[in-house]
Image (cartoon, grey):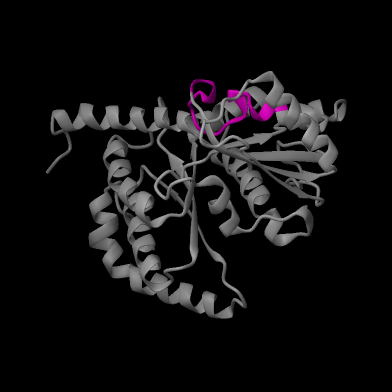
């Protein structure tokens, strides 16, 4: 690209977006034509930037028109509570929210602050870079798509996520948790059992958005295991969690757990920060606690808009 959207939603959506969107759709069409069975789209974008919010929303609206029935999963970098990349982040995010609600089938939110914390706390990286963060996200994306790429005991395809995680079309923002996130030094002398990685999924320290699921209720919960995992262990660990009553489900969704098992062990970047482990789990849970994150964003928006700051 020749220029950016300068952290401005309107610029990304209307000014520059309008010029480039047909070119982008043309490229997508060429790729889609090469697919034997197109399942859907995965969209990676940020909520805070101009291109991430403005252009991504324009693109998703157009994809809904051109490929109506195909599912759209999005991985979105959500504005963090303390760290911010742009002052007008709340404006961009609120504007792009509408598109996310209407045009995405399932949106996995992650915020940079939580990922920085995970890198510092679990991987002992003093000054995490975007590379460290991206590798963390890559593990999650890899787990989510593993069932499409490899054989396993229980396979989950893109539409199945929607079926199992989304009770109402607009409530499609699952919380992402990944375990184990440990550095190579630690993994060298401890291999974690299925019960241990399952338990750490319910710790707020493993999740990718700042909010506290212990204050909310779960509507659905999807556990994607990979590596050396047998259903017997999984059932036992889930039973333990249920008996401990750590997590509360809403009364209209009593069972709540969906499990996917994939025998392909998790892979890591050679020489990266994450340890090579025999088994891992990625939990996608639709919980009411995510409302904390939205409320935080609303509050920031209100503070700025009340003074009409940056409104031209």
Compared to residue 244, the image places residue 310 above or below, namely: below
Q: Quadrant of residue 16?
A: bottom left
* Residue at image point 70% right, 54% down: 146
Depth check: give the residue in front, 167 or 184. Answer: 167
Is 114 left or right of 258, judged from the image as shown? left
* Residue at image point 40% right, 67% down: 63
Asked if residue 43 can be seen in this view, the reply is: yes
Please check the rendered image and state whether residue 213 is part of the magenta-colored stretch, yes or no.
yes
Compared to residue 289, the image places residue 56 above or below, namely: below
Residue 12 percent across, percent down from the top left: 29, 56
Residue 269 percent across, percent down from the top left: 73, 46
Compared to residue 126, the image places residue 281 above or below, namely: below
Is 68 left or right of 308, judged from the image as shown? right
Is 308 left or right of 81, judged from the image as shown? left
Q: Quadrant of residue 94?
A: top left
Q: How many marks?
A: 0
* Residue at image point 29% right, 32% down: 298
Q: Which residues are magenta?
A: 199-215
Please check the rendered image and state whether residue 23 is part of the magenta-colored stretch, yes or no.
no
The N terminus lies in which quarter of the figure? bottom left
């Amino acid at each position: 690209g020749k220029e950016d959207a300068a952290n401005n939603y309107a610029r990304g959506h209307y000014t520059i977006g309008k010029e480039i969107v047909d070119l982008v759709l043309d490229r997508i069409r060429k790729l889609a034509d090469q697919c034997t069975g197109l399942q859907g789209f995965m969209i990676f974008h940020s909520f805070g930037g101009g291109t991430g919010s403005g252009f991504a929303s324009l693109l998703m609206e157009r994809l809904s028109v051109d490929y109506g029935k195909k599912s759209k999963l999005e991985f979105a970098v959500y504005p963090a509570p303390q760290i911010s990349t742009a002052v007008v982040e709340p404006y961009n995010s609120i504007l792009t929210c509408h598109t996310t609600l209407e045009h995405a089938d399932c949106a996995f939110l992650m915020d940079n602050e939580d990922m920085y914390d995970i890198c510092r706390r679990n991987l002992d990286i003093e000054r995490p870079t975007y590379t460290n963060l991206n590798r963390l996200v890559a593990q999650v994306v890899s787990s989510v798509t593993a069932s499409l790429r490899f054989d396993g005991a229980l396979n989950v395809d893109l539409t199945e996520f929607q079926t199992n995680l989304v009770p109402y079309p607009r409530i499609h923002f699952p919380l992402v948790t990944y375990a184990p996130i440990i550095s190579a030094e630690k993994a060298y002398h401890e291999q974690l059992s299925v019960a241990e990685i399952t338990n750490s999924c319910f710790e707020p320290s493993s999740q990718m958005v700042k909010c506290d699921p212990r204050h909310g209720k779960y509507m659905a919960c999807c556990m994607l295991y990979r590596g050396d995992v047998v259903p017997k262990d999984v059932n036992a660990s889930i039973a333990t969690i249920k008996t401990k009553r750590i997590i509360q489900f809403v009364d209209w969704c009593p069972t709540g757990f969906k499990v996917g098992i994939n025998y392909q062990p998790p892979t890591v970047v050679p020489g990266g920060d994450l340890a090579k482990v025999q088994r891992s789990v990625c939990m996608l849970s639709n919980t009411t606690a995510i409302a904390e994150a939205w409320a935080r964003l609303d509050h920031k928006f209100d503070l700025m808009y009340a003074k009409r700051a940056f409104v031209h």
